[in-house]
Image (cartoon, rainbow, N blue to C red):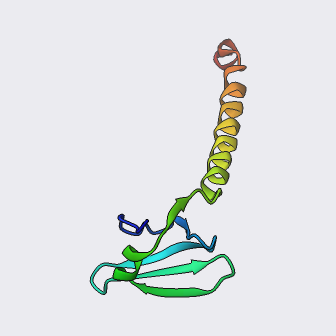
Amino acid sequence: MPMHEEPLVGATYENPEERTFKVTAFDQDEATVTVEYADGSVETLDLDNWYDMDLEMIDDGEEDDEDEDLDSEEADDEVDLDEDDDDDPDEDEQ
């Protein structure tokens, strides 16, 4: 099934041959899409070729890692807040 969506920079796609790549650039003026394959090779595609490709956007897992990092930072912030709450307000007045 041909791709009907514009390329999304940063998104990861897979074709029927299970070759996975990430879109690294999309130039509408030049009508090109630059992709980087999992093996590190880079290719520039015509936008017409993009729309002819049978692709599926996949989750590459990086977003999950970023979410976990944010959760850890938020948990650290909560710990800091809890420590501030333990202070007795009467102690500050003395």
**Residue 48, percent from left and from top:** 34, 81
Q: Position of residue 66 (x, y in %)?
A: 63, 53
Q: Quadrant of the C terminus?
A: top right
Q: Residue at x 62, y 74 (%)?
A: 19
Nearer the observer, 12 or 80 = 12
**Left or right of residue 18, residue 83 in this image:** right
* Name of the residue lying farthest toward the front: 1
Location of residue 88 with respect to 43 vertically, above or below: above
Q: Residue at x 66, y 76 (%)?
A: 38
| Front position in the image: 73 or 33 | 33
Count of numbered marks: 0
Q: Position of residue 73 (x, y in %)?
A: 66, 44
In which quadrant will I find the N terminus? bottom left
Task: Indicate the quadrant where residue 42 lies.
Answer: bottom right
Picture quadrant of residue 75: top right
Q: Residue at x 56, y 59 (%)?
A: 58
The vertical placement of 19 against 42, above or below, is: above
User: Outermost residue, top direction?
Assistant: 90
Q: Is residue 78 left or right of residue 22?
A: right
Q: Residue 64: horizontal and vertical position, in percent?
A: 64, 50
Residue shown at the point (67%, 12%) measured from the top left? 90
